[in-house]
Image (cartoon, grey):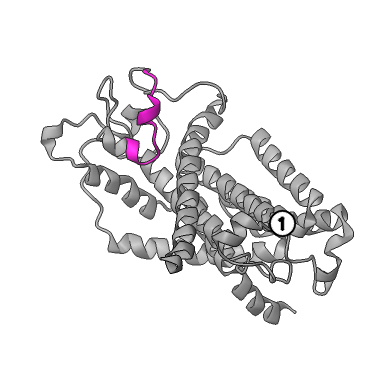
Amino acid sequence: MDHWIVPLTDGLVAAFLVVLGANLGSFLNVVVYRLPRGESVVHGGSHCPACGASIRWFDNLPILGWFVLKGRCRDCRAPIAAGYPLVEAVSALLIGGLAGAQLLSGGRTLPGTVFASGRAGADALLLHPDWRLVAATALHVWVLFAILVAAAVEADGQRVPLRWRRIALLATLLAVMAWPAMQPVGPWPGSQAWLAVGWGRGLIVSVLGIAAGILLGARGSPAVRDGFILAGAALGWQAVVMLAGMTIICGGLRRLAQRMVVSPERPGKVEHSVTQDHQSFDPPVAPADGSTLGQRLAVPVADWLSAVGFTGGDLAVAFVLHQLTWQFSWRGVQGLLF
């Protein structure tokens, strides 16, 4: 029985992180809907955009709530967009996967020697946590969340307001200046030894990263440009260079996948938006028309795959891949650049 304890504990921690990612995805839906409209993302509960009825707490479970309600409001039976559970599922996969890989590996997905001596496994995380690793993972999840917000807003044909972009960047700068050890790669070769210099080191890494984000994101969409800048502030200029290449690759793979997917038939309007009201993205189709929950879920997936301008989504996937392979890919980049 004892040999099951370690993998079971690891599995429970991983499941918790996935559930946490789904809940962040639920909050992401709120942010994406309200932020461009100037509404508070904290005050006011979720409600049906058709009848205005408040969504009950037991109906507001990420992913599951939509299926329990069969994609319709409990009160007025108006359809609820399939984009909501999809955003929650994507967030669960990306955020949960990133956090789980970094925390349960003891930081072995990260480059440099800062986290090289960390212990892997849930027992080490729970009993002897490395708070530097926890802080670094929280920073990476924060950047990923901001990229996902920008990508979802971009899918709606809008952009995150300037005020909130500045707040996100300022919060990132303050975090890395307060604890520069969260940045495992220094501004140039040989700088790894002076991790303890203080806030100046974090500021230098961030400024160079922001400059790289501005340069490499100059011709990208607003979501990509903002994402590069924020990632540069958190991770440094080297990460931005790697992210730029990975984003291009992810975009190519998405377009390849789109060619292999047959777009489902759309009865009525197409679900272009993740966050607009129900008339904009989910036509009131009667149950007798044969439109299943699976077909409704397939519509936004096909739209996202085929969207030419959905480069913010490519960046979100690229960011997670970069985080999962940073230790290994950085060795190759070091050989090429230095």
Tell me the chief SS of the magenta region. Answer: loop
Q: Residue 162: image x %, image y %? A: 66, 36
317 left or right of 119 in image:
left
Corner quadrant of residue 326 = bottom right
Is 261 in front, or is 15? 15
Q: Residue at x 77, y 59 (%)?
A: 181
Q: Furthest residue to the front?
A: 1
Is residue 272 something one can see in this rendering?
Answer: no
Residue pictured at 43% horizontal, 50% vertical: 90
Image location of residue 182, percent across then percent down: 73, 57
Rendering quarter of residue 246: bottom right
Which quadrant would the C terminus be assigned to in this image?
Answer: bottom right
**Is 62 contained in the magenta span?**
yes
Give the amino acid at mark 1.
Answer: Arg
Q: Position of residue 289 (x, y in %)?
A: 12, 36
160 or 322, nearer to the observer = 322
Residue depicted at 36% across the width and 54% down the height: 306
Q: Is residue 262 visible?
A: yes
The local crowd at label 1, few if under 14, some if 14 to 19, many if 20 or more residues have their Cα within 10 Å, is some
338 relative position to 25: left or right: right
Magenta part of the protein: which range?
53-65
Q: Is residue 303 above or below residue 283?
A: below
Residue 84: in magenta span: no
- The residue where tag 1 is placed is 132
Q: Nearer the viewer, residue 270 or 203?
A: 203
| Label 1 element class | helix
Image quarter of the N terminus: bottom left
Q: Position of residue 129 (x, y in %)?
A: 66, 56
